[in-house]
Amino acid sequence: MHTLPLIINGTGQALRSTRRKFVLLGLTLLIFAVLFSIPIFTIQGNSLAIQLSITRWTDAAILLLLSSLLSLVIVLHIELRRCGKACHASTVSMAGTGLVGTAFASLLATAACSSCIVGVLGFIGIGSAVAFVLLDYRWYIVWAIIVLSVVFIMLTAKSIGRIPR
């Protein structure tokens, strides 16, 4: 079977139940709330009102996209864990296909939000000078993170799609 039908089959198998679709939606909203609130808690003097006033629609859309991608990776990993050895995936490859990588990538993707990056990187211990340099390259970073997330989704869905329903 070719790669694209395997990916479609794997994603469809992971989202076949209504419960999984609600898990996907709930995780998307939860991860969006976490990514949006990181600067609120890491930047001193920042509040929800201030964060809402300085957040652009593009920043919110990118955070929502990354939240949905990370949620899909989590739901796919739930299905991958459920099918176990039938999916031909070892525990190492399950972790390697992107759950941890996508979570870290989503955290770095707050670079899309110019008001978020200084607080997030300051929380990690990186200075504001580096954060402002990263702002110049933020769209490259965001696109690289989106591409990596899609690759992780494709690899996981392909592993799931190999088993018959």
Image (cartoon, rainbow, N blue to C red):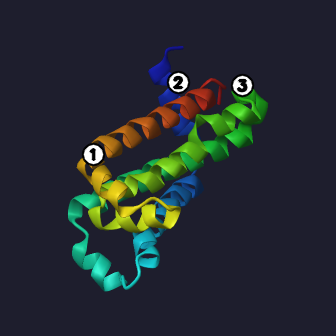
Q: Residue at x 52, y 50 (%)?
A: 104
Q: Position of residue 40 (x, y in %)?
A: 41, 77
In the image: residue 91, left or right of residue 144: right
25 or 45, which lies in front? 45
Say what secondary structure mark 3 lies in: loop
Q: From the viewer's perspective, is the residue at label 2 or at label 1 nearer?
A: 1
Residue type pointed to by label 1: Tyr
Mark with earlier residue (3, 1) = 3
In the rendering, at what x and y percent does residue 164 appear?
65, 25
Q: In which quarter of the image is residue 77?
A: top right
**Label 3 to label 2: alpha-carbon separation:** 13 Å
- Amino acid type assigned to the residue bearing label 2 in the image: Leu
Q: How far apart are marks 2 and 1 (CA)?
A: 34 Å
Q: Earlier in the sequence, mark 3 or mark 2?
A: 2
- Residue at screen point 51% across, 35% down: 152
Considering the image in quadrants, where does the N terminus appear?
top right
Q: Mark 3 highlights which residue? A: 88
Indicate which label's residue lies in the foreground, 3 or 1: 1
Above/below status of 78 relative to 40:
above
Residue in the image at 49% along x and 62% along y: 31
Residue positioned 27% across, 60% down in the render = 59
